C-alpha cells in the first residue's frame, strides 16, 4: 500500500530524470513536498501524441482515482492504490491499465508497521538507498460530469512486498526502473499482458526504511523534520499486523 509519499525535487530535475519535453511556458516553481496525502495534487508523467509525435509530458492530477463511469465522485470510494496483479481485470481499472498507464515521481514514501490493537505502530520513511527520484507505476483517468467539467485523477499500483520490506508491510508500491519507462508508458504498442513482467517487487537492496516519529501522521505536518530518524518502537523483525487498508483494490 502507499498512503503518503514525498517529492522533494523541482520541475527541472523531473524533466531530466524522465526525459520529458519542457513546455513552452515554464511551469510554476514546485517547492519540496514532504507529506503528500490522498486528494492532493500529484505529478504524473505520461506519453502524449502531439502532431503525430509521441513525447513524455508531466501534469498535475488529483491523487484518488475515479473511473469514468462513476456518476458522483462524492459517493464513490477513494481509490488511492490498485493491486497490480488484478488491475487489468477489475472494472474500475482495466480501461486505464490498457490506455492510461503513467509514472508517478517520488522521493520516498511512508509506511506504518502495525502490531495489533492497542499497540503503538512504527512509521517509516522509505527512500532509495542511493537517494534521488524513483517512479511509481500509476494509472490515470479523467472523470467528466454532465456539464463537461473534468477532473484528472490517478492511483498508485502496488505489488507484493519484497523480502526486505515484508517485515514492515506485505504490500509495496510498484517501482518502475528507468530502463522500463518506455515499455510501461507505451499504451499504443503494448497491452497489459505484455508489461506483466514489470509487475514485480523492486530489488531487495533498492530501498532504505528509516524509522520516523508520529508527526507524519498529521497531513498538516509538512516540513522536512517529519523525516528525522528516531529509535524504533519495535524491532522490524517482529511480524506486523496484516493491514489491507488502501490496498484492497
Image (tube, helix red, strand yellow):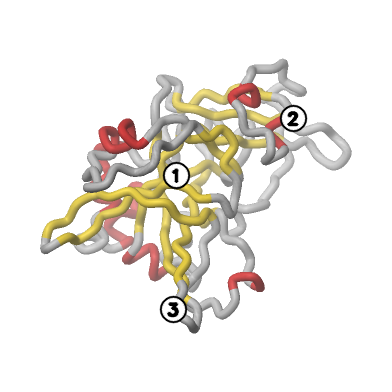
Nearest to the eye among marks 1 and 3: give it: 3
Q: Earlier in the sequence, mark 1 or mark 3?
A: 3
The image quadrant of residue 37 is top right
Q: From what the image shows, is residue 111 above or below residue 67?
A: above
- Nearer to the camera, 74 or 210: 74
Which residue, as the protein is rendered here, is positioned at the far bottom?
146
Image x and y of residue 51, in percent:
12, 63
Which residue sits at x=23%, y=43%? 22
Q: Residues within 10 Å of mark 2 (few under 14, many from 20)?
A: some
Q: From what the image shows, is residue 208 above or below residue 101?
A: above
Nearest to the eye among marks 1 and 2: give it: 2
Image x and y of residue 92, in percent:
50, 70
Q: Is residue 28 left or right of residue 19?
A: right
Which residue, as the protein is rendered here, is positioned at the far left?
52
Q: CA distance from mark 1 to mark 2?
A: 25 Å
Residue assigned mark 3: 148
Q: CA distance from mark 3 to mark 2?
A: 42 Å
- Which element type, helix, strand or loop, lies under badge 3? loop
Which residue sits at x=48%, y=51%? 156
Which residue sits at x=37%, y=51%? 59
Residue assigned mark 1: 174
Image x and y of residue 52, in percent:
11, 63
Q: Earlier in the sequence, mark 3 or mark 2?
A: 3
Residue assigned mark 2: 214
- Nearer to the camera, 126 or 224: 224
Amino acid at each position: 500500500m502507499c498512503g503518503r509519499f514525498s517529492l522533494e525535487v523541482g520541475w527541472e530535475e523531473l524533466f531530466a530524470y524522465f526525459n520529458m519535453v519542457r513546455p513552452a511556458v515554464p511551469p510554476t516553481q514546485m517547492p519540496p513536498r514532504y507529506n503528500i496525502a490522498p486528494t492532493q495534487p500529484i505529478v504524473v508523467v505520461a506519453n502524449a501524441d502531439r502532431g503525430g509525435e509521441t513525447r513524455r509530458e508531466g501534469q498535475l492530477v488529483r491523487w484518488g482515482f475515479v473511473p469514468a463511469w462513476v456518476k458522483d465522485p462524492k459517493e464513490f470510494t477513494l481509490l488511492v492504490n490498485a493491486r497490480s496483479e488484478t488491475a487489468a481485470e477489475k472494472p474500475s481499472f482495466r480501461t486505464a491499465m490498457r490506455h492510461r498507464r503513467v509514472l508517478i515521481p517520488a522521493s520516498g514514501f511512508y509506511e506504518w508497521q502495525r502490531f495489533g490493537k492497542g499497540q503503538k505502530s512504527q512509521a517509516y520513511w522509505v527512500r532509495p538507498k542511493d537517494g534521488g527520484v524513483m517512479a511509481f507505476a500509476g494509472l490515470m483517468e479523467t472523470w467528466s460530469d454532465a456539464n463537461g467539467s473534468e477532473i484528472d485523477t490517478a492511483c498508485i499500483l502496488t505489488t507484493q512486498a519484497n523480502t526486505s520490506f515484508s517485515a514492515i508491510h506485505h504490500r509495496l508500491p510498484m517501482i518502475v526502473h528507468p530502463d522500463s519507462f518506455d515499455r510501461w508508458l507505451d499504451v499504443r504498442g503494448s497491452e497489459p499482458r505484455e508489461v506483466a513482467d514489470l509487475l514485480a517487487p523492486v530489488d531487495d537492496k533498492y530501498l532504505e526504511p528509516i524509522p520516523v516519529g508520529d508527526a507524519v501522521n498529521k497531513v498538516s505536518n509538512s516540513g522536512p523534520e517529519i523525516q528525522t530518524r528516531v529509535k524504533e518502537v519495535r524491532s522490524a523483525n517482529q511480524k506486523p499486523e496484516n493491514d489491507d487498508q488502501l490496498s484492497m483494490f
